[in-house]
Image (cartoon, grey):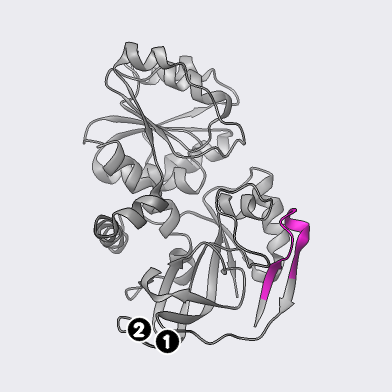
Amino acid sequence: MHAWLCTSPTGVDALAWTQLPTPAPNAGEVLIEIKAASLNFPDLLIVQNKYQIKPPLPFVPGSEYAGVVIAAGEGVKHLQVGQNVACLSGAGGFATHTIAPAALCMPLPSGFSHVDAAAFIMTYATSHHALVDRAQLKPGETVLVLGAAGGVGTAAIQIAKAIGARVIAAASSDDKCALCTSIGADAVINYSKENLREAIKAQTDGKGPDVIYDPVGGDFAEPAFHCIAWRGRYLVVGFASGHIPALPLNLALLKGASIVGVFWGDFAKREPKANAAMMAELAQWYAQGRIRPVIDRTMPMAELPAAYAHMGSRGVMGKLVMVN
């Protein structure tokens, strides 16, 4: 097998395409021949030693992938050799093969492509957990999605529309705004051209959004929070801008608003039954055509450094997927 091996988490340049022995699965594990693996923002942070999870060295990055089970360890009952699966195990995906815990593998129904499956779990689980569980979003409410053209942003637009909410998508270019409109956003704000606070007021007749979905952080967090509706819920999803904002808590008091943390990874570990039910609903929505990953592009696995560079340029719309 081959894998992008990180021997020192000093950045993308430290990754090397390395030939390794193909491992055999232990009890409770499966060996997966990887067909596709998506590039997520944590995959960039983890090779820079900036992510909260720090795997022992050396490691193979690539948190999310899909492929075919080619061997199963002792005790694995729900997966069979030859079965198509998706997995989010936190590492191992940027390779031709990987060992994965069988319990973390999602069997793929017929018609679920490897590329879509590799781009599915992290973004849709995060956005569903955020909007449905943490925000308790209701039909008819208004959602503002910041960073709306990215992976979690496009998933949030689709999930909010599936629930019956009105969606305002905020992004940094006209092309990104056009993408958001094409997948269901009711209104868009180009915050590279418009004053975000004034645009939100105009799009909500001064009422403000009931829910703000923020995977970006940075300079747009405070002006967005200033606009939140009475009893609004501000979802803290991530900090793709690299800057963690400080929100004025007096606004939470004045608006009767909630600042709500979203950590899907820990939710999945602490509440596995609720997470399984959520994933089953998402798979059903995919089968019904209500949600579909937005794929920016696919690239050969050997071109991973170029994919990292594209992600770093902030030019990605939807998800980048590496294929073998």
Question: Does residue 274 belong to the magenta stretch?
Answer: no
Q: Quadrant of the N terminus?
A: bottom right
* Amino acid under disc 1: Ala
Tag 1 secondary structure: strand
The x, y position of residue 169, in whole percent, is 44, 34
Which of the 4 image quadrants contains residue 167? Answer: top left
In the picture, measured across the screen, residue 283 lies left or right of residue 212, that is left
Q: Are marks 1 and 2 in contact (CB under 8 Å)?
A: yes
The x, y position of residue 31, in whole percent, is 49, 82
Q: Which residue is mark 2?
A: 76
In the picture, measured across the screen, residue 3 lies left or right of residue 68, that is right
Q: Magenta residues?
A: 3-16
Q: Which residue is mark 1?
A: 72
The x, y position of residue 206, in whole percent, is 35, 13
Tag 2 secondary structure: loop
Which of the 4 image quadrants contains residue 135? Answer: top left
Q: What residue is rendered at 68% in x and 82% in y?
A: 20
Residue 42, numbered circle: none
Q: Residues within 10 Å of mark 2 (few under 14, many from 20)?
A: some
Question: Does residue 15 belong to the magenta stretch?
Answer: yes
Q: What residue is rendered at 60% in x and 31% in y?
A: 243
